Amino acid sequence: MDDFERVPVEDWNAIADHLREIAADGEVSESGEGIEITVGSATFLVTKDGRVSAGMPLHDFEDGGVEALYFDHDADAIRVEGGDLSYEFRKP
């Protein structure tokens, strides 16, 4: 994960900034609870309490309590890590 920058969910402003950058050519929807980006047919949602869900045409992903997200803007990717869990969202 050398190319990924770790951003704690508690640093909400940084999380939102990173997600806006990933979704530069897509849509961003923000609320008091969280932020969701839509790029093409893919969506990625994170809430301030660490809930993450993502959807793409061939799969969905959901986790109830992450502490940080990992961003690689060169690859347009977001990684979710925790315990035995590893999921990577790539902008289509």
Image (spheres, rainbow, N blue to C red):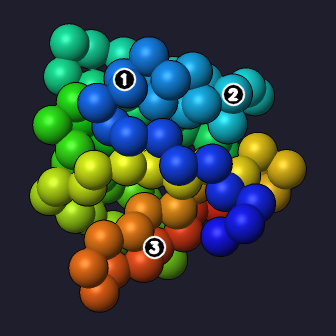
- Position above or below: 45 against 10: below
Residue drawn at the location 40% of the way across and 57% of the way down: 54
Disc 3 secondary structure class: strand
Relative image position of residue 55 (x, y in whole percent): 42, 59
Q: Which amino acid does label 2 sit on?
A: Glu
Relative image position of residue 68 (x, y in whole percent): 37, 49
Q: Earlier in the sequence, mark 1 or mark 2?
A: 1
Q: The C terminus is located in which quarter?
A: bottom right
Residue 72's disc is none
Mark 1 vs mark 3: in front:
1
Q: Which of marks 3 and 2 is nearer the N terminus?
A: 2
Q: The N terminus is located in which quarter?
A: bottom right
Q: What residue type is labelled 1?
A: Trp
Give the class, few, some or many, for how many residues have Cα within 10 Å of label 1's Cα (few <14, many ≥20): some
Relative image position of residue 70 (x, y in whole percent): 54, 53
Residue linked to disc 3: 87
Q: What residue type is labelled 3?
A: Tyr
Q: Nearer the viewer, residue 27 or 9?
A: 9
Residue linked to disc 2: 21
Residue drawn at the location 20% of the way across and 48% of the way down: 51
Residue drawn at the location 40% of the way across and 33% of the way down: 36
- Position above or below: 33 against 89: above
Outermost residue to the bottom: 84
Report if residue 42 is visible in the image: no
Q: Which of 58 and 80 is in front in this view?
A: 80
Between the residue at mark 1 and the residue at mark 2, the CA separation in whole angstroms equals: 14 Å
Residue 12's disc is 1
Left or right of 13, for residue 49: left
Residue drawn at the location 20% of the way across and 12% of the way down: 32
- Residue 11, by quadrant, is top left
